[in-house]
Amino acid sequence: MTTARPSLPLLPVTAARAMVLLCPPMCPGQPSPSRAGPHTGAGTLDVMTEQETGPGRPKPVPDLIAPGLDVLFCGINPSLRSAETGQHFARPGNRFWPALHLAGLTPRRLTPAEGPELLRFGLGVTNVVDRPTRTAAELDPAELRAGAAALEALVARYRPRVLAVLGVTAWRQAFDRPRATLGRQPERIGGVTTWVAPNPSGLNAHHQLPDLARLYRELRDAPSEVSG
């Protein structure tokens, strides 16, 4: 079933919306919010920070994720700078944060240190591979394929409206789609609508900031397909 969803509202922050509770992943039977994003009720918005790659192994950069996000962005893997700071897209010159603002997904340009603020706007961030490298070219195909399986499980668990993988080359390798192009994909990873958008790294000279913003805006306005 294909359903159109309204554009993500950018509402002023109130004291109620500013109360964000970071808690561990859901326990069996724990109720989950129907949607993350600007919260108009009087309570708090429960969000999750996925911090482990396996038993006792913390992620270098914790995921920013909650049930029912509007868009879950998926980077390829953390940069060395992101691993050092524990913040997504922290390398100087990365255009992720300005592109989000230019696309109208955030009311102002956030800094990497303000990453958890994304959850109040129905946005989240994860990575295909957790291992930090200087460039994504240092990853081997086996790492990408293993990361793809983990990503599918994560998405099936949290059910965002749209999954956006940032990097077409990584997508081709991780999901064995050598002919894939940018845009909406025929596959639904974890049962949700899946898009591929350009890597926002400053090393990617093929797409400039206006290009990134245009594609991110399409994610916001894209209809979703509900599966499962």
Image (cartoon, helix red, strand yellow):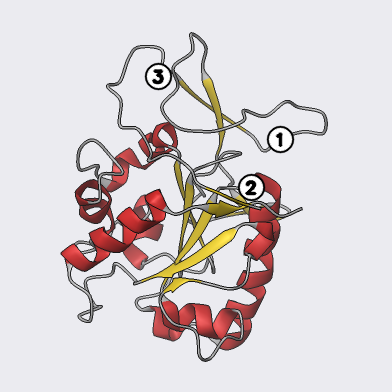
Query: Residue 142 vs residue 227: left or right?
Result: left
Q: CA distance from mark 3 to mark 1?
A: 21 Å
Q: Nearer the viewer, residue 195 or 131?
A: 195
Residue 188: horizontal and vertical position, in percent? 63, 65
Q: Nearer the viewer, residue 224 or 12?
A: 224
Which mark's residue is nearer the viewer, 2 or 3? Answer: 2
Q: Which residue is mark 3?
A: 17
Q: CA distance from mark 2 to mark 3?
A: 22 Å
Residue positioned most to the bottom: 178
Residue 138: horizontal and vertical position, in percent? 44, 84
Indicate which disc, 3 or 1, sits on the residue closer to the N terminus. Answer: 3
Indicate which disc, 1 or 2, sits on the residue closer to the N terminus. Answer: 1
Give the vertical position of 98 relative to 188 (above or below): above
Mark 1 residue crowding within 10 angstroms, few (<14) / some (14–19) / many (20+): some
Q: Which residue is mark 1?
A: 26
Q: Nearer the viewer, residue 150 or 78?
A: 150
Amino acid marked by disc 3: Arg
Amino acid marked by disc 1: Met
Give the vertical position of 110 relative to 199 (above or below): above
Query: Residue 189 vs residue 130: left or right?
Result: right
Residue 65: horizontal and vertical position, in percent? 54, 43
Residue 78: horizontal and vertical position, in percent? 42, 64
Q: Which residue is mark 2?
A: 159
Q: CA distance from mark 1 to mark 2?
A: 13 Å
Q: Nearer the viewer, residue 139 or 103?
A: 103
> Which residue shows up at 77% across the image and 53% down it?
228
